[in-house]
Image: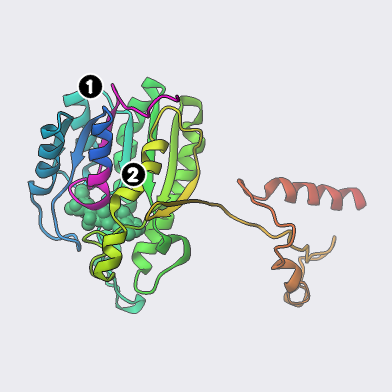
């Protein structure tokens, strides 16, 4: 029988672990042997207030089941302090799950500067600061597993969430580059777009859906991606209610609208529109199109 997925000797930092998804990840990691930093600022869903209660409750739960955990009450905007808590208490940092988050939902023209800034600060900048603080320690250990929490709102858009969507898709970009930069040091970074009934979603979902979308359904993939045996980095997954799926980009074969001697015209775009948007025989790109463009330019040169 294949070995169980365990995290003995590993140290995990889960941000926003006082509630919802983060709490579920923290409990599950601890149950499988990890030492866990349970970070939570303990504020409300719009980013107001602060309390040690949320993190303390989860730490108590973990410890009462015989697990190892310590609380941290700082905002993810103080990334260094979160990582310091891991180092001071457990001597290392192996896993970072960037999960903390709030909402400031408003239709686009009603979004204030503050609504915009706080969402970018907590979701995107917070994940950057926490991960940057952990990075040198992971590099030194030649080991790291990082999760960025995006959202289908970022991948596809959602009415009333322009600020949140921008931050969430930003996290995918951040993750894609960290996967490239971390490769040589065995640091993996993946992105998830979860769906779960939680205090964040309880304002927009009916109670029976909340019940069917328990955060715990999102635990198996996250734990697998955080394990030594995880085969993947730089990928993005959608999940919820026990369903898991990988998401990737699709690029049409496209059309060349220029000629050797001209930049092309908007009329040529119109004439080629069907071809530009035809996904028959499409590519599933994992990098930009520079090699193709270089090849095309060389062809033009040869023909000159
Ligand atoms: P939740 O409100 O239940 O939990 C989020 C936790 O983050 C809270 O305990 C909160 O106190 C904490 N937090 C907020 N700001 C913080 C800060 N600055 N520093 C530290 N902790 C902070 O929400 P959830 O539904 O479990 O969401 C977790 C993550 O998943 C969020 O990033 C959210 O955007 C994302 N997400 C959730 C869903 C869903 O369906 N629930 C869907 C897509 C994405």
Q: Find numbered disc 1 in the image and state the secondary structure of the residue it sits on.
A: loop
Q: CA distance from mark 1 to mark 2?
A: 25 Å
Tell me if 170 is positioned left or right of 291 in this view.
Answer: left
Q: Position of residue 96 (x, y in %)?
A: 32, 37
Dot 1 or dot 2: first in sequence order is 1
Residue sitting at the far front? 1
Q: Quadrant of the N terminus?
A: top left
The answer to the question of whether label 1 and label 2 lie on touching residues, with beta carbons closer than 8 A, is: no
Tell me if 268 is positioned left or right of 36 in this view.
Answer: right
Label 1: how many Cα within 10 Å (few below 14, some 14–19, many 20+) = few
Q: Which residue is mark 1?
A: 91
Residue at image coords 78%, 66%: 257
Residue at image coords 33%, 28%: 94
Residue at image coords 15%, 49%: 41
Q: Is residue 12 magenta?
A: yes
Residue at image coords 74%, 62%: 280
Q: Is residue 101 visible?
A: no
Q: Position of residue 148 (x, y in %)?
A: 38, 46
Q: Does ligand 1 reach within 8 Å of label 2's beta carbon?
A: no
Residue 265 picture quarter? bottom right
Q: Which residues are magenta?
A: 1-24
Label 2: how many Cα within 10 Å (few below 14, some 14–19, many 20+) = many
Quadrant of the displayed image that contains ligand 1: bottom left
Tell me if 186 is positioned left or right of 115 in this view.
Answer: right
Q: Which residue is mark 2?
A: 219
Tell me if 266 is positioned left or right of 106 in this view.
Answer: right
Q: Position of residue 241 (x, y in %)?
A: 37, 55
Q: Position of residue 101 (x, y in %)?
A: 26, 55
Count the labels in the image: 2
The numbered disc on residue 207 is none
């Amino acid at each position: 029988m294949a070995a169980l997925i365990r995290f003995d000797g590993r140290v995990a930092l889960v941000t926003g672990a006082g509630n919802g998804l983060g709490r579920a990840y923290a409990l599950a990691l601890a149950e499988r042997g990890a030492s866990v930093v349970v970070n939570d600022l303990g504020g409300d869903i719009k980013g107001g207030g602060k309390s040690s209660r949320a993190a303390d409750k989860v730490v108590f739960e973990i410890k009462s089941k015989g697990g190892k955990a310590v609380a941290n009450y700082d905002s993810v905007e103080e990334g260094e302090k979160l990582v310091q808590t891991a180092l001071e208490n457990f001597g290392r940092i192996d896993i970072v799950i960037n999960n903390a988050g709030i909402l400031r939902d408003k239709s686009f023209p009603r979004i204030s500067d503050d609504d915009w800034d706080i969402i970018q600060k907590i979701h995107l900048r917070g994940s950057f600061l926490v991960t940057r603080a952990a990075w040198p320690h992971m590099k030194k250990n030649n080991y790291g597993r990082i999760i960025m929490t995006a959202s289908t709102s970022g991948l596809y858009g959602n009415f009333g969430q322009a600020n949140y969507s921008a931050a969430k898709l930003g996290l995918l970009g951040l993750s894609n580059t960290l996967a490239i930069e971390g490769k040589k040091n065995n640091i993996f970074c993946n992105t998830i777009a979860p769906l779960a009934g939680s205090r964040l979603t309880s304002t927009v979902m009916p109670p029976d859906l909340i019940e069917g979308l328990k955060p715990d359904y999102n635990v198996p993939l996250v734990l697998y991606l955080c394990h030594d045996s995880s085969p993947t980095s730089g990928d993005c997954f959608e999940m919820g209610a026990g369903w898991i799926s990988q998401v990737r980009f699709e690029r049409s074969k496209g059309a060349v609208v220029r000629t050797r001697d001209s930049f092309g015209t908007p009329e040529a775009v119109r004439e080629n529109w069907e071809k530009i948007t035809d996904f028959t025989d499409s590519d599933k790109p994992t990098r930009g199109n520079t090699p193709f463009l270089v090849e095309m330019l060389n062809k033009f040169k040869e023909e000159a």
